[in-house]
Amino acid sequence: MSLSHKQKASGQKYTASVALIYGALCWGVIWYPYRLLNDIGLSGVQSSLLSYILALLIGSVLFWRRFKYVLQVPASAYWLSLVAGWTNLAYVLAVIDGEVMRVMLLFYLSPLWTLLLARVWLHEPWHKPQLLAIALSLLGAVLMLTDGQLIWPWPQSTSDWLALSAGIGFSLTNVITRFSTHLTVAAKGMLVWLGVFGLSIVVLFWQSGLAGFAFISAATLTSQVNITLLIIALLLISATLLVQYGVTKIPAIQASVLFMTELIVAAVAAYFLVHETMSMMELIGGCCIIAAGVLSVSVGESD
């Protein structure tokens, strides 16, 4: 490889790393504007519907030249939209009502679900380090959910269940994405945003019927609400596109470690913005989950 090619590859790797760290930063703080909207009367489902409408509109403007290709995705791609849509919606609902770091760490159980799904669906063999990762994930989950007291059922709140389901959804999304390499970044982004938008409509209608959409009015959509929604939409769009770019340019193990910075950002933000702290048992459980995540992706990369 020539010097110019090495410099170009090094520059792309640096740019991709910055892109992934930016994505982790966005996802580490995006819960806060959602909580602000919840405090002034917009539920998580309502604010998700509005913010993802904006994301879809802005994405349509950005990708209008390629919009016909976005619409020409195969039917199987809509499974990606459905699963990724639930992942994002469940995550938002969980961080609004639950403790931020507890939700984040339960979400990061996703390597456990990925290993299980890869075994069942892809028939990938397990190795001893992967079994250790599964054991660490389960131990961390037990410590996180019970705080050292073996109470059944372990998930003690709706936010716990939502966080767990979001992690499972994220793992399913990863598996489905492995069969969707033909999709462009624009198509993947639009499918995710469309999934959250569609599921938000279904959940609102299931909860309250047509009356559930009465919040979309001039009285609700004040300038403060509109600005907050726009900020969320811009964070969603930029994080989605930059993360998609980043994961295509650097090895999976490095990408996964960089994603872990989301936990640091979320911990700092939760402490200073809403004064949330974790118990010692929760911290130990969280360390087990993080160690299991790093171990699982390390083995996957070496294979």
Image: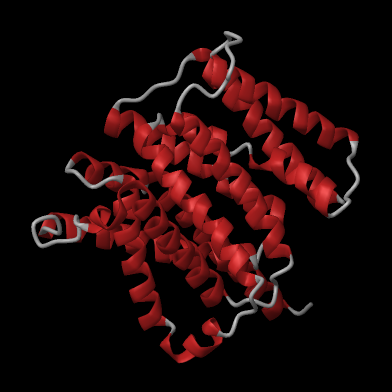
Residue 40 on image: x %, y %: 17, 43
Relative placement, left or right, of 78 versus 137 is: left
Work out whether residue 207 or residue 162 is closer to the camera in this orientation and state it: 207
Vertical position of residue 48 compared to residue 184: above or below: above
Please state the horizontal and vertical placement of residue 203, each as a whole percent of the image.
Answer: 40, 52
Q: Quadrant of the N terminus?
A: bottom right
Q: Is residue 194 above or below residue 116?
A: below
Q: Residue at x 58, y 20 (%)?
A: 154
Farthest residue, direction top: 149
Q: Residue at x 50, y 30 (%)?
A: 160
Image height check: is 193 above or below 29? Answer: below
Name the image quarter holding residue 166. Answer: top right
On the image, the x and y values in percent for residue 263 come to 50, 38
Q: Is residue 251 visible?
A: no
Q: Nearer the viewer, residue 220 or 56?
A: 220
Q: Quadrant of residue 247?
A: bottom right
Outermost residue, left direction? 219
- The colour scheme applied to this rendered structure is secondary structure
What residue appears at the point 52 percent right and 50 percent down from the top-left corner?
87
Where's residue 250, x and y in %?
A: 67, 62
Q: Is residue 248 visible?
A: yes
Question: In the figure, is residue 220 to the left or right of 255?
Answer: left
Q: Is residue 64 left or right of residue 232?
A: right
